[in-house]
Image (tube, coloured by chain):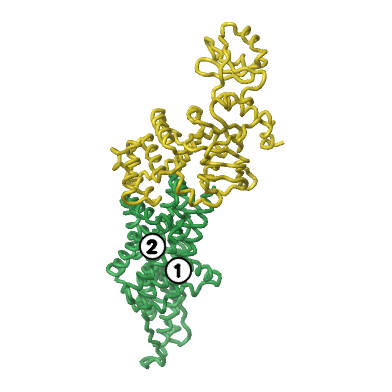
């Protein structure tokens, strides 16, 4: 039995319908020869939403973006952006969609101003409209003092801001961000996210892929893609309550003790311990509820308390569940 | 139509900015062809002269000296050493100190006087075929001339050939090679610049960004072709000037016709550059592929070897090489003063090839960027 066939045995969340969807995907499937890169993925994203797409590298995140932007025709299924069919209206979609990748897509030997000018030209924005839009981007990103600086001389954070500025130069209603903050420092990352929130507040819809949990946690709703399938979808609290993430008869606990790393080994050996991992100075574990007493007896000095699973806990448990089902 | 070339002008303007930001690359792109032109223009000379020659004269007579003088006077042979034995004669040849060995046997003068055939042994190093051919022809010619004057005495020759070399009367090699060199150098420069410019965008991820914008593949490609086309055209003008002023190759035809007919060639080589860019993932790969186009265009385009004497298969191959047609145009206009009516078919073939290459490259580009 192959792994893919078995994925369906894992309980999934149905594609949540939203009011006035801006992005829709219905049974989206993309195959390259015999390899299925995206397998029957369905979801909807509403206007002004910050939608996160989480998954390991190679799980099909970028392929989905390319398909939604009309670069790749899906093998099966349908999709729309702003009501436009991704199969038939690719050229039209590109004018209304912004895209920013971790590679920036900036010309390092050109100045900030020249990069903005180039992308404005590419989207056919000219004259006064271009000047007005440029001013708006300056106000938003704070790039004004760097206008005549070559991009190669900017720090990662400023490059990212410029990349965002270039991606939204044509005032797109939808922006795809493909791992937008890979490799930049936390401060720059946070300020970039502030920009996303600001724009999302103005009604711009964001579709963000990432493999950072903390980044996913900032999103209104998160989809988790694993082995080409969308295996979970919902808001953070919804995901935390997911049955698959909280198997029946188990408890998610935090174990606080003097030396967490010392007891991690013995703890993992014990019957009824499904997962255990270090979290700072304590241990997060998924333990069969009737074994909790035995564990407390074994480690009498440890303080055990029930907790709500973190997003990471949810996805790890989901992934284990899928791996187990496919064995 | 407009949608097909969407984004052409922004791309074109951006490309000019790139070029202006990197003066070193620009300098090398323009200076290296000029350097190569000087090197090759002076070094390549197919007229064979001054072949180092070793002599073994056993006869040591007035007649044998007369023969050797005639040989040396031809300018084809240069007697570098006179030896005393067969071993030394062959030794010099083996060591490649001499390419030709002349042995005049001891009975040379006697046989000549007795009206029996006197023989002269001419050893020729066959490792260079054109040198060997020239050596054999010249030595046979010298012998023939001496024989005739021996037979006729003071009488006039019954038949005389008066050769008249058209178009390149001095048979200077530069006149033949420099026009061809222009094609080869331009090709190398243009293919490399275009291919690198696109592959650089792929390497840096800006190409991925561009595929997400409304820029049309042809808009991107033609937008990149214009700046490099302008550069190459400027380079062509400089090279032609150097050819005229430094190498003293006269242009017999119309320079403006030449410049106009260079445009389809530039179109074609830019198309080849674009095709290479769709195949190469890194700049190093693009460089290698671009260099790979140099050999066929040097050896199978008529630049060095005459197409008319090639086996039919390679003559067929040469028809697929754009340089072949441009060399015909260059030599036609520069050397023979040919006009539009003599050459239009070459320009037409180049135009068709160029458009095909560009469309094919655009199609490949669309196909690849889906994945």
Badge 2 density bin: few <14, some 14–19, many ≥20, Cα 10 Å: many
Instruction: Give how far across and how far down residue B72 sits, in percent.
Output: 36, 75
Task: State the residue at coordinates (32%, 57%).
Answer: B31
Q: Mark 1 points at which residue?
A: B350
Disc 1/disc 2 C-alpha distance (Å): 15 Å
Residue A95 higher or lower than A193, as above or below: below
Up-down relation of residue B23 to residue A144 (above or below): below
Q: Which quadrant, please, contains the N terminus of chain B?
A: bottom left
Pointer 1 or 2: first along the chain: 2
Task: State the SS at label 1.
Answer: helix
Q: Which chain carries label 1?
A: B
Give the colour chain B carries in the figure.
green
- Residue A13 to residue B97: above or below: above
The residue drawn where x is 48% and y is 66% is B353
Q: Where is residue A175 in the image (x, y as percent from the top left)?
A: 46, 41
Q: Which of B72 and B294 is in front in this view?
A: B294
What residue sits right under mark 2 in the picture? B186
Q: Which mark is residue B235?
A: none
Please give the letter of the chain rendered in yellow.
A
The answer to whether residue A37 is visible is: no
Left or right, A148 with reference to A8? left
Chain containing mark 2:
B
Left or right: B237, with A93 as reference point: left
Q: Is residue A173 visible?
A: yes
**Residue A120 in picture, x, y percent from top left:** 37, 48
Residue B356 against residue A257 in the figure, above or below: below
Front tag of 1 and 2: 1
């Amino acid at each position: 039995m192959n792994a893919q066939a078995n994925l369906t045995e894992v309980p999934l969340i149905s594609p949540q319908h939203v009011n006035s969807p801006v992005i829709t995907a219905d049974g989206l499937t993309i195959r390259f020869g015999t390899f299925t890169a995206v397998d029957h993925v369905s979801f909807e994203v509403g206007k002004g939403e910050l939608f996160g797409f989480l998954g390991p590298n190679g799980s099909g995140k970028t392929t989905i973006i390319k398909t939604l932007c009309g670069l790749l025709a899906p093998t099966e299924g349908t999709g729309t952006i702003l009501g436009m069919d991704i199969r038939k209206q690719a050229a039209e979609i590109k004018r209304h969609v912004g895209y920013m990748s971790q590679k920036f897509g900036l010309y390092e030997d050109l100045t900030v101003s020249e990069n903005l000018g180039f992308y404005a030209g590419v989207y056919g924005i000219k004259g006064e409209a271009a000047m007005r839009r440029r001013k708006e981007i300056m106000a938003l990103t704070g790039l004004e003092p760097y206008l005549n600086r070559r991009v190669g001389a900017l720090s990662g954070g400023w490059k990212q801001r410029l990349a965002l500025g270039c991606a939204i130069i044509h005032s797109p209603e939808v922006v795809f961000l493909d791992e937008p903050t890979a490799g930049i420092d936390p401060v720059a990352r946070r300020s970039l996210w502030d920009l996303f929130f600001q724009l999302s507040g103005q009604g711009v819809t964001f579709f963000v892929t990432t493999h950072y949990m903390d980044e996913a946690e900032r999103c209104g709703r998160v989809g988790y893609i694993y082995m080409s399938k969308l295996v979970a979808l919902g808001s953070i609290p919804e995901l935390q309550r997911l049955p698959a993430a909280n198997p029946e008869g188990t408890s998610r606990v935090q174990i606080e003790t003097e030396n967490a790393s010392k007891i991690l080994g013995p703890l993992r050996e014990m019957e009824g311990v499904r997962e255990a991992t270090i979290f700072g100075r304590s241990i997060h574990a998924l333990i069969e509820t009737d074994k909790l007493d035995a564990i407390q007896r074994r480690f009498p000095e440890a303080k055990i308390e029930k907790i709500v699973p973190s997003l990471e806990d949810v996805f790890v448990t989901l992934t284990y569940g899928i791996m187990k089902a496919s064995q | 139509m407009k949608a097909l070339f969407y984004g052409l002008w922004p791309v074109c303007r951006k490309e000019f900015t790139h070029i202006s930001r990197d003066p070193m690359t620009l300098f090398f792109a323009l200076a290296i062809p000029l350097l190569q032109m000087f090197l090759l223009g002076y070094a390549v000379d197919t007229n064979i002269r001054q072949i180092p020659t070793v002599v073994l004269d056993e006869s040591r007579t007035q007649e044998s000296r007369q023969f050797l003088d005639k040989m040396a006077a031809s300018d084809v042979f240069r007697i570098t050493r006179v030896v005393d034995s067969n071993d030394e004669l062959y030794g010099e040849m083996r060591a490649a100190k001499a390419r030709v060995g002349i042995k005049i046997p001891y009975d040379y003068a006697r046989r000549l006087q007795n009206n029996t055939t006197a023989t002269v042994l001419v050893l020729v190093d066959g490792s260079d075929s054109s040198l060997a051919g020239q050596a054999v022809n010249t030595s046979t010619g010298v012998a023939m001339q001496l024989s005739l004057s021996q037979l006729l005495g003071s009488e006039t020759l019954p038949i005389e050939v008066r050769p008249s070399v058209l178009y390149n009367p001095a048979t200077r090699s530069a006149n033949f090679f420099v026009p061809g060199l222009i094609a080869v150098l331009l090709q190398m420069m243009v293919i490399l610049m275009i291919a690198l410019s696109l592959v650089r965008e792929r390497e840096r991820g800006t190409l991925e960004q561009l595929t997400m914008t409304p820029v049309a593949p042809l808009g991107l490609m033609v937008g990149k072709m214009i700046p490099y086309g302008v550069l190459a055209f400027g380079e062509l003008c400089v090279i032609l000037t150097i050819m005229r002023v430094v190498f003293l190759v006269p242009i017999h035809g119309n320079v403006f016709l030449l410049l106009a007919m260079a445009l389809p060639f530039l179109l074609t080589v830019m198309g080849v550059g674009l095709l290479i860019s769709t195949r190469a993932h890194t700049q190093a790969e693009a460089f290698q592929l671009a260099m790979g186009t140099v050999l066929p265009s040097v050896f199978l385009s008529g630049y060095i070897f005459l197409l008319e004497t090639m086996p039919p298969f390679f003559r067929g191959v040469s028809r697929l090489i754009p340089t072949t047609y441009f060399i015909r145009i260059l030599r036609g206009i520069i050397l023979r003063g040919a006009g539009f009516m003599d050459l239009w078919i070459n320009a037409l073939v180049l135009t068709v090839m160029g458009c095909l290459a560009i469309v094919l490259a655009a199609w490949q580009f669309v196909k690849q960027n889906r994945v």
